Amino acid sequence: MKTLGIAAKWLFILCLPVLLLTASLGWVANSLWLYKYGFQKYNVSQSLADWGLKLTDSELESIYAGLISYFNSPDEYISIMAVKDGKPFNLFTPEETIHFRDVKGLIWLDYWVLLGTLVYVLAYAWVCLLWRRKGYWRLAWGLVGGGSLTLVLILLVFGLGTLLGFSQLLYRFHLAFFTNPYWSAEGYMLLLFPENFLRDAALFCTAITAGLAIILGGVGGGYLLFTRSKATP
């Protein structure tokens, strides 16, 4: 029984970084605010205009909203229409639609992992709360451990990013998670998502994950310090 409790605690600690990361990734993938921030900061409309596609900010925002809608739809392939020289056309090439299908698959994998870790974390927390004081201590230590592990992993990724550079890290990510080269397909996709745009999205995701880890770890650590101070004569 004791071994089972130790295993459950360590599984909680390991699940917490995954939960926080997948939650952050889910927010990034569905944040229209972040897309608007990116296309305004990196002047995506001008890049598109240089390629002959002139869009207003509202039209560009509608395209990003269409991407979010597609990621959460049952559709296998994306279909977004735009107007060029007065004629409607499919914004993305067949190769780009295949890449977006692959991206959608990763997003849904993120959703399922998020759901699985959330169910376990909530179940573990509920059981701990049923145990009253002893359970509170277990949960608090789990929050401190999980939050600390999350921050350590973030530091390791930052170190790797500093060593390799974001471009190389992004390249290796695509090699690891995609089975075809369509992530580099020529078309409007790369103009809509310049590398600096993706770098900022990664930084936002990292910041959210770290912030959540600090909050949860701080709550757990605060409880441990409070109870220890009360127990000290």
Image (cartoon, helix red, strand yellow):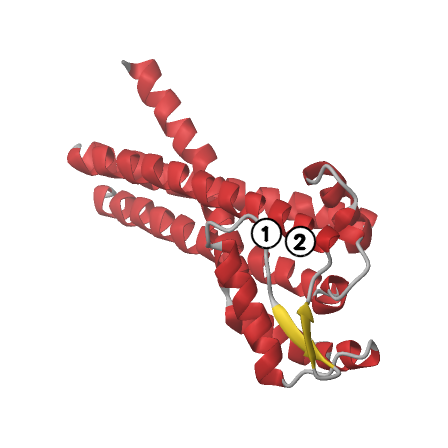
- Badge 1 is on which residue? 77
Q: Position of residue 60 (x, y in %)?
A: 62, 77
10 Å neighbourhood of mark 1: few (<14), some, or many (≥20)? some
Q: Quadrant of residue 180?
A: top right
Instruction: Describe the element under mark 1 as helix, strand or loop.
Output: loop
Residue drawn at 49 percent across, 47 percent down: 22
In depth, the one of 49 and 134 nearer the eye is: 49
In depth, the one of 219 and 116 nearer the eye is: 116
Tag shown at residue 183 = none
Asked whether disc 2 touches disc 1, contact meaning CB atoms under 8 Å apart, the reply is yes
The amino acid type of the residue labelled 2 equals: Thr
Q: Quadrant of residue 140?
A: top left
- Up the image or down, 203 lies above or below 107; here it is below
Residue drawn at 64 percent across, 52 percent down: 100
Using residue 55 as the reference point, say whether residue 138 is left or right of it. Answer: left
Question: Among all residues in the image, which is located at the extreme front?
Answer: 87
Q: How many marks?
A: 2
In depth, the one of 146 and 180 nearer the eye is: 180
Instruction: Describe the element under mark 2 as helix, strand or loop.
Output: helix
Q: Position of residue 121 (x, y in %)?
A: 34, 38
CA gap, disc 2 and disc 1? 6 Å
Work out whether residue 175 can be spotted.
yes
Residue drawn at 81 percent across, 47 percent down: 163
- Up the image or down, 228 lies above or below 14; here it is below
- Up the image or down, 152 lies above or below 75; here it is above
Q: Position of residue 207 (x, y in %)?
A: 56, 60
- Up the image or down, 88 lies above or below 185; here it is below
Work out whether residue 146 can be spotted.
no
Q: Position of residue 94 (x, y in %)?
A: 72, 53
- Badge 2 is on which residue? 97
Residue drawn at 19 percent across, 37 percent down: 133
